[in-house]
Amino acid sequence: MSTIEQAPAKHVGRSLRRKEDPRLITGRAQYVDDITLHGMLHMAVVRSPEAHARIVSIDTAAASAMDGVTAVFTGEDLSDLLAPLPMAWAPPGVEMKVPERWPLARGTVNHVGDAVAMVVGEDKYVVADAAQAVVVEYEPLAVVVDLEEALKDEVLVHESLGTNKTHEWSMGGGDVAAAIAAADVVVEQRIVNHRIAGAPIEPRGVIAEYRSGSLTVWSSTQVPHLLRLFFAVQMGIAEDHVRCIAPEVGGGFGGKLQVCAEETLCAWASKQLGRPVKWIETRSENMAVSHHGRDQVDYVTIAAKSDGTITAFHANIIQDCGAYLGLLTPMIPELGAFVMTGCYKIPNVKTDITGVLTNKYITDAIRGAGRPEMTHMLEVMIDQLAARLEMDPIELRRKNFIPADEFPYETPYGITYDSGDYAATLDRALEMLDMDALRAEQASLREQGTLRGVGFSTYTEICGLAPSRAVGPKGFGLGIGLYESALIRVHPTGTVTVFTGTSPHGQGHETGFAQIVADRLGTDPSCVEVIHGDTATGPMGLGTYGSRSLSVGGVAAAHAAEKLAEKCREIVAFNLEANVADIEVGDGRFSLVGDPDKGMTLAEIAGCAYIDATAMPEGMELGLEQSLIYDPSNFVFPFGAHVCVIDIDAVTGKAEVVRWIAVDDCGPAINPMLIDGQIHGGIVHAIGQALFERISYDENGQLETGSFVSYALPSAAELPSFETDRTETPSPVNSLGVKGVGEAGTIAASAAVTNAVIDALRPLGIDFINMPLTSMRVWEAIQEKGGAPA
Ligand code: MCN
């Protein structure tokens, strides 16, 4: 019997307002920069203005002499560090070229913003000024910025590696070459998935305090436990003497899933100087040296029979890693390759990936991490194929969907999709859209100079990152297996604390997890506090990313609560002199089946467990506390259908999203409002990439988009209200039936925008444009075809 049946849901499924919001919207939340410690020093980083250069000399004398400066350190000073910054992916059988990456450069700088020295002093203004006074002499080296140029190895980013190619990796099934040779139709396309920023509201920030042999670090991170593990290794401090705390974190979008140079710099400097050290990233630093995402060039081929049956899909991906490899850099496209067939039954598939180094900052996981790129290329190619076949793209999708009755479905490359009903989400989206009316509007708008387009994206993704055996060292090659932990403590008065190893930074776990636990313990979510982001409170956890928190961490909390509920039932049965099997939880208490007046509240049960041992069954351990680690058997595979309706001004090229329909399926909703919030944010992220955002470097490796003046984030004014709905197809993988949703909108949406823009422009003879579909790019495409229609 599933857990859902055992514990009748009361709070689960409700759009409860977020418990965390009052403190966030009244300014009561505590972010890293709100913390001041006694005797705290401040740190600023001296960064390279050169994209590639040998460091000839560093003169710190003037900076050191400035009032209020405590110390200036360079890479040589940090020679006692036991390990460089980590890269955590080593798949068995894949040869990786990994350039060493130290928190302060040793000998050369390899991208603009590379850290060369740090200045520590009494206040943040002093150290900012002193950083300017550090004189670094550079001998410039040749720069390579374009990833395809870099592959030629004519300019090497790291001379010592002898190549810019970091690795090659392939995955697939069937016989792609034979299927392409035998196909009726073959469509090829070069698709550029350009570099973007994570752009959280709160840039990164760190405070480190080394005192009496123990290190405490407050960091705006998504992974406090991983950080602790790393500090233990890098600084040689016993893990139990390291505590990492992620206080309130103002968004991460993957950008804080990293072990950062500045975290080490603060910790190391605190140990040297015996005082706490703080560093708060500026927005310009955030744009330059918080990792970027995407940045790959994809050579894609799709093959089909003339009736629209897709027979093969091949992607040759070149990934721009930047100048070094971050925590997960080379793994990102591989994660996308796990869902290279998307929603479709494609018997022959292959993804070939090549990682390449350039003189730019590192790329790594940004919301979706590989899956937006994979979905983008597949969904754009579906529309390209439909056009070639002169077939309705909706019908082409439908024809190739994996049917609902074929789940669990094993892909040709050995991944098992858990559950799905792709046609159901598409049907619902079409119902909401009214395609006939839309096509009629499209025709009349065209006469008025507005080019309207409609674009679809039907996606499935892989998330719920775990299970340990699949992703760990002997599986997919991560340095550590992924599982999640929960510790639940019912206090003597019946209030509940849940400690989770997940580390939310905007997702609303305090609310959703409280709903799950409250239902299982017969209490109200307001009586359940969820504590996260502190390695000193709960068991080892792996953090929040990969839309894993609910389907791994939330399920851990559910299981721990169920174990506690079992103990509660035994205590109640003992006190009512009833059978355990006759005690049920519901309506705020544990009571006798068929006689709800006879029962006990959680507070009364806790009273037995902590206060009156005679009210406990003989031999039962006192207290009400349960710790648990959950390691699922498989990933989970959410899916959905997104529709973008876009209007393009034929004269200016400006594209405006006028309607967005999203029907997503992430299993049974714990809290529909949380899901909507995640979907909204996810879609905006992808619309941003598709229409506006782009991290750009010039040919000398200078960052051209170093602030929000030049990096265009969309605001509410550029966006329509989203029309969302859900279907609920439970996953058989976990007892809640849930799947992830935190990245779904981002994974789905960029292809829908691109397909809509191409749909609008196709009558002008334009059949493909790469993102970002800025007014300039669209205008140029229209000009190439003779300008706006009269
Ligand atoms: N949820 C639910 N019912 C479901 C599925 C999910 O109520 N059936 C809720 C969960 O309880 C949780 C939220 O939806 O509150 C997201 O859950 P999940 O999909 O498990 O994703 P994570 O919590 O692991 O969040 C990670 C994901 C990622 S990878 C990025 S990047 C991201 C994102 O979430 N960054 C975010 N959402 C973000 N939201 C904010 N505000 N800020 C970020 O930086």
Image: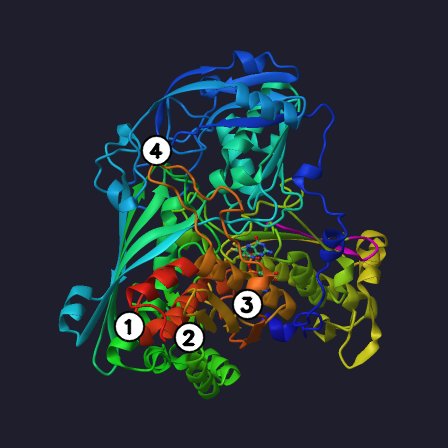
Q: Does 603 lie within the magenta span?
A: no
Going by the picture, which residue comes out furthest to the front?
Answer: 790
Q: Is residue 259 visible?
A: yes
Q: Tag 3 or tag 2, which sits nearer the N-term?
A: 2
Q: Which residue is mark 2?
A: 453
> Which-is-in-front pick, marks 4 and 1?
1
Front in this rendered view, residue 253 or 414: 253
Q: From which residue to which does the magenta span run?
A: 491-501
Q: Which residue is mark 4?
A: 99
Q: CA distance from mark 1 to mark 3?
A: 44 Å
Q: Which residue is mark 1?
A: 765
Q: Which residue is mark 3?
A: 738
Q: Residues at badges 2 and 3 in contact (C-beta under 8 Å)?
A: no
Q: Amino acid at mark 4?
A: Pro
Disc 3 element? loop
Q: Tell whether 578 sits left or right of 370.
A: right
Q: Tag 2 or tag 4, which sits nearer the N-term?
A: 4
Q: Residue at x 65, y 28 (%)?
A: 124
| Ligand 1's quadrant | bottom right
Q: CA distance from mark 4 to mark 1?
A: 46 Å
